[in-house]
Image (tube, rainbow, N blue to C red):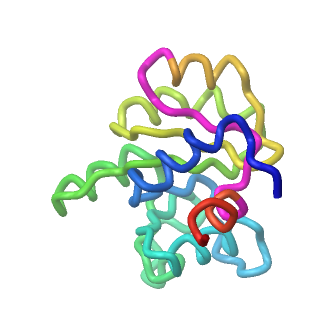
Amino acid sequence: MTPTSNDALYRRVLERDRVIAVVGLSAQASRPSHSVAAYMQAHGYRIVPVNPTYAGRPEGILGETCYASLGDAAAALAAQGSAIGMVDVFRRSEEVAALIDEVLACGARSLWLQQGVVDVQAAQRARAAGLDVVMDRCVKIDHARLMSV
């Protein structure tokens, strides 16, 4: 695969941000969010599920407690001495803008919008606040391409 001009950004985020809050993570193994999160978990990343549908269920998702919001997840991780590094979004593009305040408040260093998720204004707002932003890319594909060599 041909390198992109943003590979240095992708690599920096993947090397630095090892705790990933996955917004919209599904418990259904057939869903892309589940397979992407499982892949990242298998490669040493801590996955923090964020999905109000599954929050509080004892089984969690991928063996991890699922939270209703990024704020809930950030508070729980802080109590454990940890923090969210990356927020990986599996939501519709039109839902991203409503997440930005939570993303900024949770202390994440990067925002990754999965393939097909595009909100230029939300991305600009996150960048202006100092976050590294990746948009319309799959974290699993870029990890496999950049980090598994």
Q: Answer whether residue 28 is magenta in the image.
A: no
Q: Answer whether residue 134 is magenta in the image.
A: yes
Please say if 63 is above or below 104.
below
Q: Please name whichever residue, 146 or 136, is drawn nearer the observer in this view of the structure.
A: 146
Q: Please name whichever residue, 65 or 130, is drawn nearer the observer in this view of the structure.
A: 130
Please say if 71 is above or below 14.
above
Q: Quadrant of residue 96?
A: top right
Q: Is residue 83 left or right of residue 34?
A: left
> Residue at the location (37% across, 54% down)?
73
> Residue at the location (64% across, 26% down)?
97
Residue 37: % across, % down: 59, 69
> Residue at the location (81% across, 51% down)?
2
Magenta extent: 128-141
Q: In this view, does 104 lie to the left or right of 80?
A: right
Residue 27: % across, % down: 64, 75
> Residue at the location (69% across, 63% down)?
145
Q: In this view, does 75 lie to the left or right of 91?
A: left
Q: Quadrant of the C terminus?
A: bottom right
Residue 135: % across, % down: 70, 37
Please say if 113 is above or below 35.
above
Q: Quadrant of the N terminus?
A: bottom right
